[in-house]
Amino acid sequence: MVRKNQEEKELEICISCGTETEVKKTDNVIYRSGYIEGAGQLCFKCSQTENLSLAGSFETNEWFRYGL
């Protein structure tokens, strides 16, 4: 039981929604997906939302920009 509590403390917390991520605090930031330098770690869901907002509108298909 003590080991599980230690493992929970080692996981990063999402800076956007506050949930636990699957990323350990000891993992190198170079290999992390969803890490924002100077801010912290995003969970998978928030990192995907961030990618969509950078790509454009949530309602349109990505290929709509290219006229396909």
Image: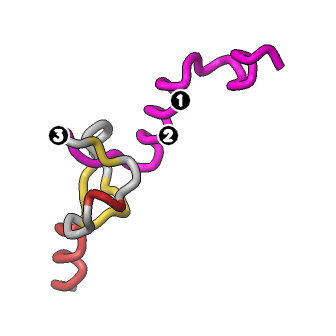
- Answer whether residue 43 is magenta in the image: yes
Query: Which residue position holds label 2?
Result: 48
Question: How far across and down, in percent of the image, does residue 39 sit?
Answer: 19, 39
Q: Which kind of residue does numbered mark 2 sit on?
A: Gln
Tags 2 and 1 touching, CB below 8 Å: yes
Element at label 3: loop
Q: How many marks?
A: 3
Against 35, is 46 above or below?
Answer: above
Q: Which residues are magenta?
A: 39-68
Query: Which residue position holds label 3?
Result: 38
Mark 3 vs 2, N-terminal side: 3
Q: Which kind of residue does numbered mark 1 sit on?
A: Leu
Which residue is at 22% across, 45% downward?
40
In depth, the one of 13 and 1 nearer the eye is 13
Q: Which kind of residue does numbered mark 3 sit on?
A: Gly
Against 34, is 54 above or below?
Answer: above
Query: Which residue position holds label 1?
Result: 52
Question: How far across and down, in percent of the image, does residue 42 sit?
Answer: 34, 45
